[in-house]
Image (cartoon, helix red, strand yellow):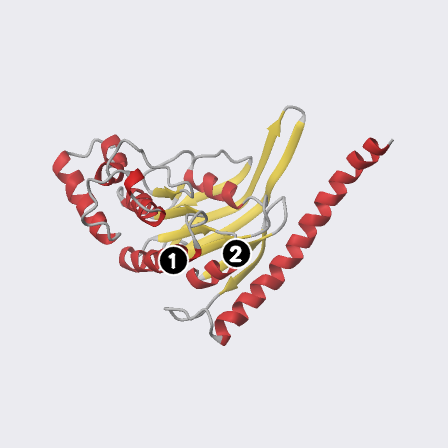
Amino acid sequence: MDGDQVGASIRIQGLSKVFTEGNRSVNALADFSLEVRNGEFICLLGPSGCGKTTVLRIVAGLESKSAGSVVVKGREVVSAGSNRGMVFQEFALFPWRTVRRNIEFGLDMSQVPLQKRQEISSKLIDLVGLRGFEDAHPRQLSGGMRQRVGIARALANDPAVLLMDEPFGSLDAQTRNLMQRELLRIWEATKKTILFVTHSVDEAVFLADRIVIMTARPGKVREIIDVGLPRPRDRTSREFISVRGKVLLELDEEFEKARAKEMAQRAPARAASAQ
């Protein structure tokens, strides 16, 4: 059966990425493959430097690949496009633009008429709970509110896929939990496919349909865990803690591998300095 008929939204096959700087090359990804179903919420987890953000940036069209293929809604990704929306950890808002004008940025670039832009931004302002703050500037908003603007801006062009790179990583714990619940509400309302990078096991288990655990660099898929818990999820439940424990067990092995590689790479330098 054709993948589009069963709802394939993202298909990544044999993805590799080598970064080269001078005479030094780093294999960030090697043979990374993943299929994401339409409307699915996927979280990527793995050791630091395993290539989680690199995967996201290649899917977004912001980074070139060294080998493999990335297909979004049946089309090969060769550059950035309006069928993918990106949400960054750093908010990346324009400080001189109001909430409404930040949300409308992509629509401006697409030369959408004024009335249509305002209709879209008004709906999104309501969706992310920022009614009454349309004319505020980013400096007047809390971290959580700024990230709501970032989410609304990413949704403005009605992308098929929402790509989120640790969007709540800079928020305090209470705000982060609130934004996780808000994101689920928005996801359920929009039915978007979400590919979400995080370092938090708790966040991944709370949010995801499936959790993709990546190996230490060069990154590839080690394990895919189907969370299988009904929403809303209770972080204190036995079932939640069981899934969390399973994810941690897989991750711990990769962290140990990453640490061993790092120690092995440092050993020659330490030996040379001791001479």
Which quadrant of the figure contains the N terminus?
Answer: bottom left
As drawn, the residue found furthest toward the right would be: 275
Residue at numbered disc 1: 180
Where residue 98 appears, x then y in whole percent? 23, 37
Disc number lying in front (1 or 2): 1
Sequence-first disc among 1 and 2: 1
* Residue type beneath disc 2: Val
Q: Can residue 224 be seen in this snapshot?
A: yes
Where residue 105 appears, x then y in whole percent? 26, 35
As drawn, the residue found furthest toward the bottom would be: 238
Residue at the spot 26% in from the left edge and 52% down from the top edge? 128
Q: Can residue 1 be seen in this snapshot?
A: no
Residue at the spot 29% in from the left edge and 42% down from the top edge? 153
Residue at numbered disc 2: 212
Residue at the spot 56% in from the left edge and 63% down from the top edge? 247
* Left or right of 200, for residue 268: right
Residue at the spot 70% in from the left edge and 43% down from the top edge? 262
* Left or right of 260, for residue 215: left
